[in-house]
Image (spheres, rainbow, N blue to C red):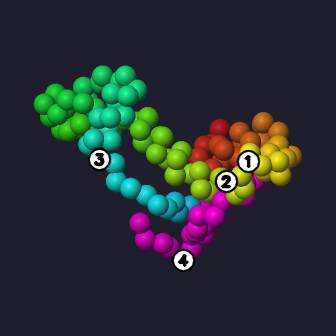
Amino acid sequence: MSESADVPVVRQRGLWFEELETGVLYKHAPGRTLSEADNTLFSTMTMNPQSLHLDAAFSEHTEFGERLVNSLLTMSVLVGLSVGHLMLVDPFRPEGVARLFATQPPAAERVRRLEALAGYRR
């Protein structure tokens, strides 16, 4: 993906929840390519026997024409990639715990911010 001059770019350094903004491109590094083995291992470890993830012969005859990456694997990788942006300090050190709990906005405000980040409109 190419960077655009009109889109703010934030390099990985760690951010607090209130620092996240809509319309910002958050670059996560390092990254990696998921392999067929990753998908097979994750699907079998999570006890997901869906043929779309495991059976090439079956998947050939579906609308997709090949196996699909397990959606929970995709979500897990995305959550893992976000850790560097969301961890500015060690939350297990006393000052980190105090900072985490002292700055949390009310639940309704957190939901509103997450919806805005996801582009959700009521």
| Residue tagged 3 | 35
Instruction: Tell me whether the residue at label 1 lies in contact with that at label 2, contact meaning CB atoms closer than 8 angstroms.
Output: yes
Vertical position of residue 80 compared to residue 2: above or below: above
State the residue at coordinates (52%, 47%). 80
Q: Disc 4 and disc 1: Cα gap in Å? A: 34 Å
- Say which label, 4 or 3, has the lower sequence index: 4
The spot of residue 86 in percent (x, y) is 65, 53
87 vs 7: above or below: above
**Looking at the image, can residue 121 be seen?**
yes
Callout 4: SS: loop
In the image, residue 31 above or below residue 4:
above
Tell me which amino acid carries mark 4.
Answer: Ala
Q: Is residue 62 visible?
A: no
Percent coordinates x, y for residue 13 in the rendering: 63, 64
Q: Examine the image and state in which quarter residue 111 appears.
A: top right
Q: Earlier in the sequence, mark 1 or mark 3?
A: 3
Spatial CA span between label 3 and label 2: 27 Å
Residue 84 position, x and y percent, is: 59, 56
Where does label 4 land, which residue? 5
